[in-house]
């Protein structure tokens, strides 16, 4: 779980609330870890008997270095005991103890970042897409680090351009499915003398056709979640070229990454 979220933790230590991982106790039955650097968000959860681990209503924030140390601490350990006490996460394994000071900050309301629905879904082979992106990354630099997707029916053209090094172009097979957006909620009857309510942004989007003729990403934001997956097949979902996309393994709802596209 740590390896699934550590890559999207912010490296900016001045943004304390982003340079950490949110831990949430889901009804005493599961642990959820969430991380974001402002451009992407990663979420993973797993069932554990966590009724006794008190994480508070808003969860706890474990700093990036603490997550790295915890990962190192657990190497070779079959079981680890966890507790939260005096604003610290305490891990014990045998005669070893690790104490991590928690951050007293507020994590972003991540649920608002995750789109509630998607109109288009593409399904592809994870290994093929990963190897393709790795090849295209060879022409990437800090200044030029994007990849453009151009869907064309049963395949997609991926292109990465760098005027200093060269260009890369690849074609990957995938399948495409579309779904009707949810119907806008029925407008409440306007009270006499009241003002007309504005249509929420999500309902406005539902009335617009999806514009996904081309979209681009920071190539690293795709490679990281694909590397953390083990499934053979992956799906990517989207609504508009400039709105968040979701990437997750088919049949595994316990882990996904939400990625903001780059401007073309």
Image (cartoon, helix red, strand yellow):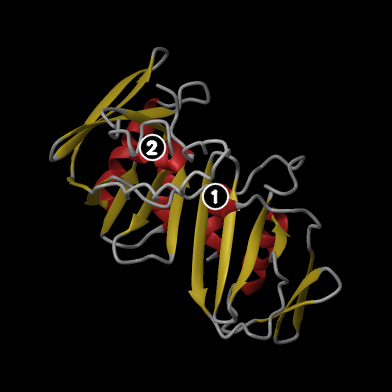
Q: Are marks 2 and 1 in contact (CB under 8 Å)?
A: no
Examine the rendered structure and indicate whether residue 124 appears above or below residue 262: below
Examine the rendered structure and indicate whether residue 58 appears above or below residue 19: below
Q: Is residue 168 left or right of residue 54?
A: left
Give residue 188's position: percent from left, percent from top.
Answer: 46, 49
Q: Secondary structure at mark 1?
A: helix
Examine the rendered structure and indicate whether residue 203 appears above or below residue 84: above
Mark count: 2
Q: Which label is found at residue 205?
A: 2
The residue under the point 26% across, 60% down is 232
The residue under the point 69% across, 64% down is 58
Q: How busy is the neighbourhood of tag 2: few (under 14 within 10 Å), some, or many (20 plus)?
A: some
- Judging by the rendered image, the residue that carries numbered circle 1 is 112
Q: Is residue 78 left or right of residue 67?
A: left
Give residue 62's position: percent from left, percent from top.
Answer: 71, 61
Quarter occupied by residue 167: top left
Find the residue positioned furthest to the front: 192
Give residue 109's position: percent from left, percent from top.
Answer: 62, 52
């Amino acid at each position: 779980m740590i390896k699934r979220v550590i890559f999207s933790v912010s490296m900016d230590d001045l943004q304390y609330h982003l340079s950490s991982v949110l831990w949430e106790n889901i009804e005493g039955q599961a642990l959820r870890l969430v991380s974001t650097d402002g451009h992407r968000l990663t979420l993973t959860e797993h069932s554990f008997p966590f009724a006794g681990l008190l994480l508070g209503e808003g969860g706890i924030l474990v700093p990036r270095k603490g997550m790295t140390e915890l990962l190192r601490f657990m190497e070779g350990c079959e079981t680890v005991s966890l507790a939260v006490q005096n604003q610290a996460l305490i891990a014990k394994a045998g005669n070893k103890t690790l104490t991590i000071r928690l951050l007293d900050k507020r994590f972003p309301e991540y649920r608002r970042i995750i789109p509630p629905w998607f109109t288009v879904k593409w399904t592809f082979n994870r290994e093929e897409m990963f190897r393709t992106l790795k090849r295209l990354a060879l022409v990437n630099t800090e200044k030029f680090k994007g990849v453009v997707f151009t869907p064309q029916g049963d395949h997609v053209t991926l292109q990465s351009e760098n005027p200093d090094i060269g260009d890369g172009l690849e074609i990957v097979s995938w399948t495409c499915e579309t779904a009707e957006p949810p119907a806008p909620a029925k407008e409440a009857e306007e009270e006499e003398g009241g003002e007309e309510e504005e249509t929420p942004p999500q309902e406005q989007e539902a009335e617009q056709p999806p514009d996904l003729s081309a979209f681009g990403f920071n190539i690293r934001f795709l490679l990281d979640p694909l590397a953390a997956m083990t499934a053979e097949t992956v799906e990517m979902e989207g609504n508009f070229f400039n709105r968040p996309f979701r990437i997750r393994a088919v049949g595994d709802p316990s882990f996904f990454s939400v990625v903001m596209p780059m401007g073309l």
